[in-house]
Image: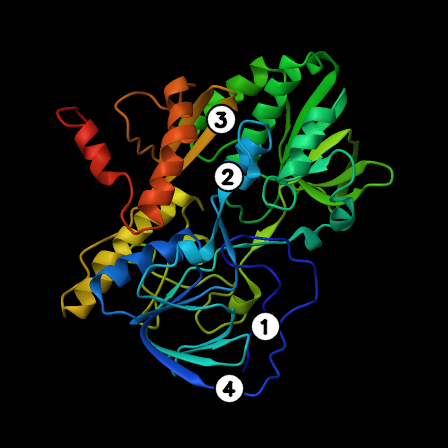
Amino acid sequence: MLASRCSVISYSNGLIKLGARGFNTSFQRQYRQSFKFVVVGAGSGGLSISSTLARKFPPHATAIIEPSENHYYQPLWTLAACGIEHLEDSVRPSASLIPNGCTWLKTAAVEFNPDKNIVITADGNEISYEFLIVAVGLQLRFDKVPGLQQALGTPGVGSIYSPLTVNDTWKAIQNFQGGNAIFTLPNSHVKCLGAPQQIMYLAEAYFTKNNVRDKANVIFNTSRDKIFGVKKYADTLMKIVKKREIQVNFQRNLFEIKPDTKEAIFEVLDGSQSKKTLETYKYDMIHVTPPMGPPDCLLGSPISDRHGFVDVDKFTMRHKKYPNIFALGDCANTPNGKTTAAVAGQMGVIKANLFALLDGRAMPAQYNGYSSCPICTGYNKLILAEFDYSGNPLETFPFDQSKERYTMYYVKKYILPEVYWYGLVRGLWPGANLVRRILHLGLKK
């Protein structure tokens, strides 16, 4: 049975899903290619593991399935949306990042057949493998909110989650002259849960700098029941929103947006009502974090769980049923924060475990759920949240990272992009574990 049709998004970019349009899966099979390793997706996860494989194995042992011409460093989009960086600095041609020796199949996967070790692509080809690594990320679902696609591009509406809407966000912040500035967080999986707050804090700082803050009602409507999942950082963030008079409304999920009347309708998720309770807010500016979910090619797939995420062991990153399949990044059903830092840690685990399997050894590595969420709270200060599966802080630096610091802002703005382009996507950055151990030498736990 064919999997659901893949949408017009690309794996590495997270572009907007526009609706029903998709790949035609009623095609005639064309030809079959075989590889030792097939990596689906050339985002940060796919490129990192592909680069690792390319250095160890002969040319063309590894194939990468990726339809996108461009690759984006998405953490820069928050800074571009508030005038600190430029959107064009976040993009590089995919061709410049595909590792030498890897075969790039410039198409999308539409079906996984793990019993036959085959991936079916959008152009009708069968790609067989000995080992499969899935790294297709999340897709953005602007279409899940009625009126939202029509609202995109209209005055005051933006989102930092797509390259098509980042500059609209900056324009909305610049043009804001007062009224309600609303920032949303949906009731779904989200790439980098701190990003919707980052753009809010930066926008609020811009309003203050440009003397419109006293005319602004800054509102954070979040579907969650707390501002952040780790108490240490949540305590600090609640102090910040109180000090800066930001209104936080918990358990509010964006239900509909009406661009003609500039109204945003939210559903109350507290579960106390027998019927759905809706609240309507007028907006002068709104930043929308869209609902997100697994790409359509994973929905109903034999390699996925019932929610459409690749069903892996959360410690080894190996598939629970198919021993020659691994997954990393946002498409895996591991219960960690979906961030670039998590990808780095997972890549190191997969590398160690895959190479051990090839050598006939037991898998030695376990992923502890490490994730990092740099939260800009202003134009020169940042909280660097780092934590594990249990929500325990797992901080790299030997000081309290829950405090706002310029040094951490410097790390995000100048150091992390270099680590990304010259470390992670080249398979040379397996996470911060070694750095953490070095910086904590001699310190008590």
Q: Are marks 3 and 1 in contact (CB under 8 Å)?
A: no
Of tags 4 and 2, the one toward the viewer is 2
Q: Are marks 3 and 4 in contact (CB under 8 Å)?
A: no
Q: State the mark number for residue 376.
A: 3
The alpha-carbon separation of the residues under discs 1 and 2 comes to 34 Å
Where is residue 407? Give x, y as percent: 37, 20
- Residue at image x 37%, y 28%? 411
In the foreground, 442 or 108: 108
Tell me: 280 left or right of 4. Answer: right
Secondary structure beneath dot 1 equals: loop
* Dot placed on the residue nearer the N-terminal end, 3 or 4: 4
Where is residue 162? Give x, y as percent: 60, 46
Disc 3 crowd, CA 10 A, few/some/many (<14, 14-19, 20+):
many
Q: State the mark number for residue 30.
A: 4
Q: Are marks 2 and 3 in contact (CB under 8 Å)?
A: no
- Residue at image x 23%, y 34%? 435
**Amino acid on which disc 3 is placed:** Cys
The alpha-carbon separation of the residues under discs 3 and 1 comes to 38 Å
Where is residue 342? Give x, y as percent: 37, 46
Q: Tell me the quadrant of the picture where the N terminus can be found.
A: bottom right
- Residue at image x 74%, y 24%? 176
